[in-house]
Structure formats: C-alpha cells, structure tokens
Image (cartoon, rainbow, N blue to C red):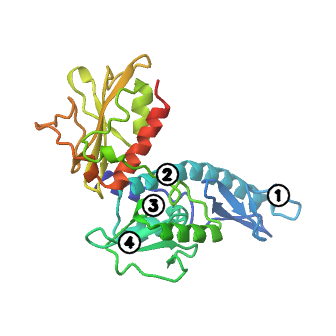
Amino acid sequence: MTRGELEDRVVPDCGLDENGRREFSFGPRSFSFVLTGDLKPMVRDESGKLRPGLPDPGSKDDAAVAAESVEEWKLLKKQIKEVAAIQAARLEQAMVTGRRWSPEDFQTLLARHPLMTHLVQKLIWAGFDAKGKKVLTFRVTEERDLADADDNAITLDKAAQIGLAHPLELTEAERERWGEVLGDYEVISPFPQLGRPVYTLEPAEMKAKELDRVKGIKLVAPTLVFTLEKMHWSRGVGMDGGCFDEHSKQFPAAGVTAVIGYEGNVGMGWISPDELLTLTSVYFVEGMRAPSGYGGWQVGGGKDAPLPLGKVPPIVISEVLADLQVLKSKAK
C-alpha cells in the first residue's frame, strides 16, 4: 500500500453520517451542515439560508438540546476546518501528479465518504481507459450521482481509472462547458482547476535537457526547503555530514520524476536561516526516481540521464514551472 492509499483510508468522518450530513437540533427547529468552496463550515437553516454558525437559542427553543448542539457545532467546525484543508491539498496534488483510483476505490473512498464527498462534488473528474486515454468527464452531484456536462446520468463502465481532470487534459470547449456548469450550480472549487494557470516551454527549450530559467537564483535555505516541501517535493538523501543537495517530485501518471538541484550548506539536522542556496539545475528523468544526492548520483550507483524537455509531458512541465514561479517570487 502506498502512502496515498493509506491516507485515503484514514480520513476521519468528523461526525458526519454516511451521506455526509449532520443536523443540529434546537428542538422546534434544526440546521444542517454545509461546506463551502473556500472550505468554511457553515449551516443552512430550514428556509435554505446559509449562516456562518448556529444562532443564539431563542425562547421557543429547547435550551438543553440547543446547548448540546452548540457544543457539537464548535467541535465539528474546528475539526472540519483542519481536515478539509489537508484533504483539499491532497486532492490538488493528486491532480498535479496524475494520481488515479479504480472506479471502486473512487466511489468508496472519495465520492461516498462522509467528508470527502463534499470536496469531490466541487471538482471535475475524468475516466481513463487501461492505457490512460481519457474516455469521459463528469461531476458528482449533491445526491452523489454521476453526471456529464449536460446533466445526464452516467456510469463508470468504460473507465478503468478515475482521476481529477487537469486543464491540459481538457479541450477548450470542455473547460468552457464545465465552467458554465459549475457557475450554474454556484460551485466554487477548493483549489484552481479549470482556470489553473498553464505554463509551457519556449521553442528554444524543447531540445535542452535542463530548465535554465532559474539557474543562479538564490534563496535563504529555510525558504527553499520548506517552500518546496509544502508543494510536496521530497528532499534528497543525507550525504557526507548529513547534508542534502536536491529535491525531487514524482509524477506517476506521466512516469517521470522532476529534480531540482542546488548548492550550499543545508543539513538534515539544521537548516540555517543565514545560509543562501543557489539553484543549479532543474531536469527530468524517466521513471519513479527515489530521492538521491551528489548531483544526480543514485543511491546504489548510476548517474541520472535527463530527458529532453520536449519529451516531458506538458502537465509535468506546467506544474514544475508553476512551482518554480513560486520559488522565483521568494528569491533574494
């Protein structure tokens, strides 16, 4: 079982029922849980009005029941806020790296999970055949049914794998149509999906084996290390003295690993805020390369063989360039 597969199976339900609902009773009136697109827990009253929280109990409410509900709401609100942010970040990285689920796992672990269903319903999904070709796109409705862009009910019979649709996997017409659908239903995605910025190579870079745009950029060690790790890059192995000189990121769907190398003194046990690191290389290798060091020498022997940039899938290029833009904005 991979780390991602394990994380799928330990997502808490935060007290939501099997349908992803939670009712808070005041006796004669009740309120239902809602998760907004910006991951804020809210409640909807019986008239359909959204509220940021439960109101103060009134004279006609059952005081004891209302007090219990208020305490339950405070706990749920705190739990949901923390867990939903973590899970939204996981789903964004699943889209970035091209992670796929079997149709059965998608239904069980995502679409019908009490908490995850609220996030799943705010995103556009795609079905792929056994060779990785996109065969359909769909969304999950509030009733947890599957629907295409014309609101027709669909099944996943033709799909061998399910994944989040990256904008580069959609045609312009598909992006526009799905944007209209989400707009019609007033759905706000928990992270940029259809309108996600897309980055491409310059013509002169197609035959190169390294991205030279960021070479020589200097960043304070904690900024470089922790910014990359926040974006789910893995630090290299500890070399002599416990220092490391790279971060890498695997893209399973593309079968490619991206590697960022740098110079400077940065160690596993101490990342000095006074140390400047200089980016020296950004390249891509075929396969799921494990974290390494010494400028691309693999643990157990063998030197990296960088791919020509033109042979790296566009989604990988776009997402790595997006991360490099973040680094560049923080450079000294």
Among the two numbered marks 1 and 4 on one chain, the one whose residue lies closer to the N terminus:
1
> Can residue 117 be seen in the rendering of this structure?
yes
Question: Of the residues tagged 4 and 3, which is closer to the observer?
Answer: 3
> Can residue 185 be seen in the rendering of this structure?
no
Q: CA distance from mark 1 to mark 4?
A: 47 Å
Residue at (40, 24) in percent of width and height: 218
Q: Which residue is mark 3?
A: 167
Q: CA distance from mark 4 to mark 2?
A: 23 Å
The kind of secondary structure element at disc 2 is loop
Residue 283 image offset from top left, x and y in percent: 27, 40
Question: Of the residues tagged 4 and 2, which is closer to the observer?
Answer: 2
Q: CA distance from mark 2 to mark 3?
A: 9 Å
Residue 48 image offset from top left, x and y in percent: 75, 69
Task: Give the answer, above or below, for where 25 lies relative to 151.
Answer: above
Q: Which residue is mark 4?
A: 127
Q: Can you tell which quarter of the image residue 161 is in?
A: bottom left
From the viewer's perspective, is 108 left or right of 55?
Answer: left
Task: Give the answer, above or below, for where 208 lies relative to 38.
Answer: above
The kind of secondary structure element at disc 3 is helix
Among the two numbered marks 1 and 3 on one chain, the one whose residue lies closer to the N terminus:
1
Q: Which residue is mark 2?
A: 197
Q: Which residue is mark 1?
A: 57
Residue 206 image offset from top left, x and y in percent: 29, 48
Q: CA distance from mark 4 to mark 3?
A: 14 Å
